[in-house]
Amino acid sequence: MRYNGPAMDASAPAESHAIELRVYYEDTDCAGLVYYANYLRFCERGRTELLRGLGFSQNELMREHGIGFVVHRLQAHYRHPARLDDLLRLETRAVSATRTTVVFAQRLLRGDLPLFDAEVTVACVDLQRGRPVALPAAVRARLFLS
């Protein structure tokens, strides 16, 4: 089965968020290409900045609500390599949720060229017990404004 990546189209909801990233030497392998695991680090930054843009700091969620987010499932498609010094754009949006999880679609681009797609399911967990808990209503409401 061929994976085509999550849909990222012009009808993306207002919750879509984008950040720019520069590829530094530390991000690359000896050939000057971004090391495969670093794409996941970029995606983590994108999800964090989407939440921050909606008014939620990961630090505050941990401190005030005792919750954190852990990756539960990941599907990735590496399309083209990113290279040293590239200026990239990472687009992130929440596409669905259950009581305890959120699915994010993420796409990394160089100009208009898609380099990497990921669909990442994160689970909301109680940090004391390490167990899944309901996503706070305020977070859900901001992620999925209609």
Image: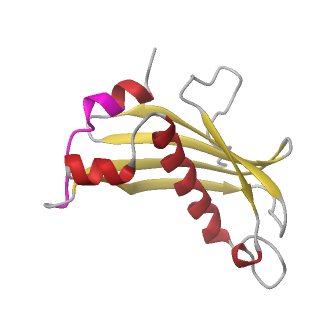
Q: Is 69 one of the magenta-colored residues?
A: no
User: In the picture, residue 24 is in which quadrant?
Assistant: bottom right
Extent of the magenta region: 130-139
The answer to which of 52 and 106 lies nearer the viewer is 52
Q: Residue at x 31, y 34 (%)?
A: 98
Q: Residue at x 51, y 37 (%)?
A: 53
Picture coordinates of residue 100, whole percent (x, y):
27, 41
Location of residue 79 with respect to 107 vertically, above or below: below
Picture coordinates of residue 5, whole percent (x, y):
65, 44
- On screen, residue 81 versus residue 55, left or right, reads right
Picture coordinates of residue 26, whole percent (x, y):
70, 78
Picture coordinates of residue 115, whole percent (x, y):
77, 53
Residue placed furthest toward the top: 146
Q: Residue at x 57, y 23 (%)?
A: 14
- On screen, residue 87 versus residue 145, left or right, reads right
Q: Is 134 one of the magenta-colored residues?
A: yes
User: In the picture, residue 30 is in which quadrant?
Assistant: bottom right
The answer to which of 119 and 111 lies nearer the viewer is 111
Residue placed furthest toward the left: 129
- On screen, residue 23 versus residue 138, left or right, reads right
Looking at the picture, the colour scheme in use is: secondary structure
Report how many numbered discs are placed on residues in the image.
Answer: 0
Residue placed furthest toward the bottom: 30
Q: Residue at x 38, y 51 (%)?
A: 58
Location of residue 122 with respect to 34 vertically, above or below: above
